[in-house]
Amino acid sequence: MDARDDQATIAPTTETDPESPAVVEPEEAEDLGRIGYGRYGRWTPFALALLLIVTLLAIGIANQRRHGSADSGTTLLGGSPVAGVAPGAPAPDFSMNLFDGQPLRLSDLRGKVVVLNFWASWCDPCKREMPAYQAVAADAGSDVRIVGIGLKNDKDADARAFAEKYGVTYPIGRDTGGASSALLGPIETAYGINFAPTTIVIHPDGTVSAVALGPQTEDRLRALIKQARE
């Protein structure tokens, strides 16, 4: 027998095996990896757009909760869904170093109406309300103390320049305590601050009188102080 007869001869078949996968030509193979290919290809751009929108919304909500700006001016008298304290609850005690180097402790102000203003230099609504705070602090009376608390998520130089620009003379500083890696300061954490500006008004007995979100006007601040006095 000729040695060539020992070698199996494999001839190409022209029949299609129904059990074998379809042959994909090079151009088709390239298309299989492309977005929009296949039975549901026309829906792919819409699905990607929806996914992008959901992702951006999630990021926006997270950023707003971390360092958002409230611009509503809403006063919450019966409860607070956004702050860690509610009217009628004891105001958490804290200590803070002011920009002038003096220490301040909330419990030392017991017997006075205390207005805590949480702010940041990057917060546009904070800029609008600062003149109102300074005007009210100038003539509120000896039984009222306004305290500005700058958020930890700020630059010290910017915060000091901010206070100087608006001529702040009432006690003001920044919530810089806690671990250096922490994004929130201990005062922000204790009060559950999610927005800037946020105003917390405290009765002379040390309980919370009101929680107000957004920039405050002189009239609104005076009304909140009057309420806390009663």
Image (cartoon, rainbow, N blue to C red):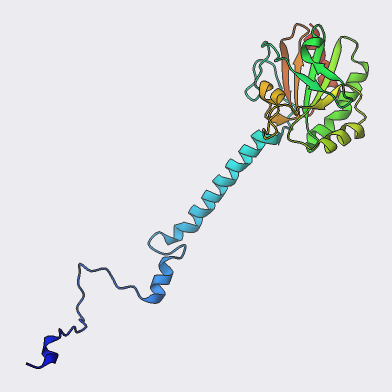
Task: Identify which residue is drawn at 70% across, 35% down.
Answer: 67
> Is 134 above or below relative to 23?
above
Task: Identify which residue is drawn at 19% across, 78% down.
Answer: 15
Q: Residue furthest bottom?
A: 2
Task: Identify which residue is drawn at 62% across, 38% down.
Answer: 61
> Is 166 above or below relative to 10?
above
Quadrant of the drawing holding the C terminus? top right
Give the percent coordinates (x, y) of residue 190: 67, 21
Residue nearest the observer in this picture, 187 or 61: 187
177 horizontally vs 1: left or right: right
Give the percent coordinates (x, y) of residue 41: 43, 61
> Is 21 above or below relative to 176?
below
Q: Quadrant of residue 220?
A: top right
Q: Quadrant of residue 38?
A: bottom left
Task: Identify which residue is drawn at 81% across, 10% down.
Answer: 108
Q: Quadrant of residue 24?
A: bottom left
Give the percent coordinates (x, y) of residue 216: 80, 26
